[in-house]
Each structure stands twice: as structure tokens, then as C-alpha cells.
Amino acid sequence: MKARTLLLLILLGAIAAFAALNWSTFTAATTLSLGIAVIQAPLGLIMLAVLVFLTVLFLAYVVYLQTSVLLEARNHAKELKTNRELADQAEASRFTELRNFLEQGLKQRASLDTESRTIVLGRLDQLERDMRLSIEQSGNTLSAYIGELEDRLEKGAVGLTPLPPN
């Protein structure tokens, strides 16, 4: 129990005990002036009734305040839940958008890789053909030189006379 509530209950208990101990005085008739008239009434009971009325009025006001606070908290909770759902949806859409962006980027990268590979393989094939052609031409040229040298050697051998032995 909160300290204020405990203090209020102790105060109300003390007033009730005071009224019970002095009940005969509370109910004794007294002359009271209302400003325009004079009446005979028990002053203690009137003051006690005013105190009870103010206490009931105060409790009604406290109940009203608590009810309005609870309703406002409930409305805030609803708004918070709605905003949380909106934030979750926005986050989910951002994740979906990011996934789509990454998938698109990966597809572009894969197509670029395939295109680059095709180009590189084409160039390698062309270089291989060029190299084979170059090797073949070098082989043919070399064979032609060797054949020419053989022809020269054969022609030179026919016109040469053997050297006398020493």
C-alpha cells in the first residue's frame, strides 16, 4: 500500500473515532446563523456531513482521473501497436527491397561474368589458332631453309674435288 493511501486511511479512521467518542456533542442542537435566517441544528452532524460529502466528491474525482488515465493509456497502447505494425511492415518491405536489389545485382554480375568468360574464351581460341598458324609457318620456313641448304650442299659437293691425302 502506498504511503499516501495509508495516511489517508489513518486520517479517516481518526475522524471516525473522534466522531464516535464525541457523538453526543455532535448531535447536540445549536443555534446556527445562515445569514438570512437562524436555525436550530446539530453543528457536528452538519460538519461531519460536509466532510463526508467532500470525501465522496474527492474519491469520485480520483476515480474519474484514474479512469481517464487508463483510457488514455489504452489509446496510447493501441497507437503504439499500430505504429509498431507499420514499422514492422516498413522494415519487411525494406528487407524485400534489399533482397530484390541483391538478386538483381547478382544476376547482373553473373551475366557479366558469363559475357566476360565468353569473350576471354573466344580470344584464347583466336590466339591458339594464330599461334598454330605461326608455328606452322615457322616450321614451313625452317623446312624451306633446310631444303635450300641441302640443295646448296649437294650442288657444292658435285663441283668439289676431294683433297689429296697428306
Image (cartoon, rainbow, N blue to C red):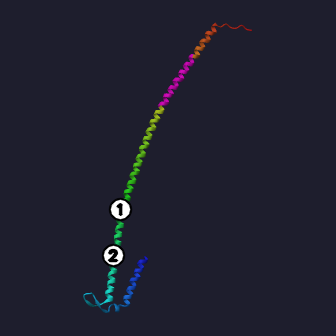
Q: Does residue 154 lie above or below 5 as drawn?
A: above
Q: Residue furthest right?
A: 166
Picture mark count: 2
Residue at the spot 39% in from the left edge and 84% down from the top edge: 13
Q: Which residues are magenta?
A: 122-144
For the point 41% across and 48% down, the residue is 98
Q: Main secondary structure of the magenta part?
A: helix
- Out of 94 and 125, give the one closest to the viewer: 94
Q: Is residue 24 left or right of residue 114?
A: left
- State the residue position of label 2: 61
Question: 34 above or below 116?
Answer: below
Residue 78, placed above or below residue 55: above
Q: Nearer the viewer, residue 83 or 163?
A: 83
Q: Residue at x 40, y 85 (%)?
A: 14
Q: SS at mark 1?
A: helix
Residue type, mark 1 in image: Glu
**Residue 15, horizontal then vertical, whole percent:** 38, 85
- Which of the 4 image quadrants contains residue 40? bottom left
